[in-house]
Image (cartoon, rainbow, N blue to C red):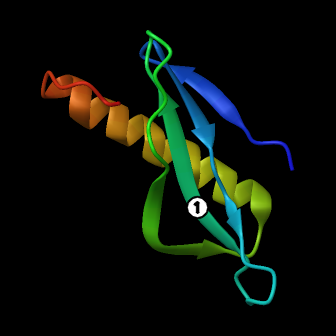
Amino acid sequence: MQSLHCEYRDHTITASVMPHPDSPLPYAAGCLITDPEGHTSRRFSIPMKFFSDLENAQHVSLAHGRALVDERLDRGQQVV
């Protein structure tokens, strides 16, 4: 499975979707964030967000990552 990723405010956000094959909503959304120095975060999951479609799960994961970067940078904190 290829993960979507994007560059945002000098950070790389990578969708980290976990499969749950025997579920009616088999994809759990989450993301990894890599800072400009190359440090990668732990997986940030989105609590209680499951999707039936892989593409939607990946897009929501990227949006979640962008929101986390905004939140941390706007407060002057490092993301990773």
Q: Quadrant of residue 62?
A: top right
Say whether residue 27 is left or right of residue 68: right
37 vs 47, nearest the viewer: 37
Q: Give the position of the C terminus as an image quadrant.
A: top left
Crowd rating for badge 1 (residues with CA inside 10 Å; few <14, some 14–19, many 20+)? many
Report the residue that reaches farthest toward the left. Answer: 75
- Say whether residue 73 is left or right of residue 29: left
Q: Position of residue 28 (x, y in %)?
A: 61, 68
Please state which amino acid type lies under the numbered disc 1: Ala
Which residue matches tag 1?
Answer: 29
Task: Please tell me whether residue 56 is drawn above or below residue 8 in the rendered image.
Answer: below
Asked whether, in this view, residue 4 is left or right of residue 41, the answer is right
Depth check: give the residue in front, 74 or 20.
20
What residue lies at 67% left-to-right and 51% top-to-bottom? 58
Residue 76: where, in percent of width, then height? 14, 21
Which image quadrant for residue 71? Answer: top left
Q: Nearer the viewer, residue 24 or 43?
A: 43
